[in-house]
Image (cartoon, grey):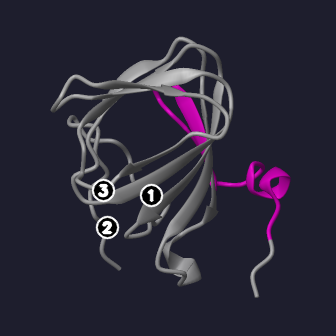
Amino acid sequence: MIVRTLAECAQTERKVEDPKGDWNSVRLSLKDDGMGFSFHITTIYKGADFRMHYQNHFETVYCISGKGEIEDLATGEKHPIEPGTVYMLNKHDEHMLRAFEELQLACAFNPPVTGKEVHNAQGAYELIED
């Protein structure tokens, strides 16, 4: 059994800050935990507006707090993000995420991330092999 707290993980290398200042992510579960997914609590700062395209991962995101929107760049469709909303990037969807207020999100990635990934020019995480 693995037991961790958000507070303790936030004081370690499991807390990753976006170099551009748009978000931070506390990785509660990573690939080396052997769960088959990674689980993060991510904060998107108010005013952030950025493109992402997870070409190598599927992601499910649940909004805990805040308000924003996600735009599907293939269709132009925009969806409000608010507490209780979940979105699933089941087709490696290229998207824009906008935070009208600070967003706190619970995120699961499959395959799991190692914790060493950074967004590339397309807004994706590269796959890191063991």
Give the mark toward the camera: 3 or 2. Answer: 3
Tell me whether circle 1 and circle 2 mark residues in contact (CB < 8 Å).
yes
Element marked by disc 1: loop
The amino acid at mark 2 is Ile
The amino acid at mark 3 is Asn
Residue found at x 51% / y 59%: 108
Which residue occupies the extreme left position in the image? 74
Q: Which residue is mark 1?
A: 116
The alpha-carbon separation of the residues under discs 3 and 2 comes to 20 Å
The alpha-carbon separation of the residues under discs 1 and 3 comes to 23 Å
Left or right of 97? Residue 10 is right
Q: Give coordinates of residue 128: x percent, y percent.
A: 31, 67
Instruction: Tell me if residue 29 can be seen.
Output: yes
What segment carries the magenta color?
A: 4-25
Residue found at x 47% / y 79%: 36
Q: Give coordinates of residue 55: x percent, y percent.
A: 21, 52
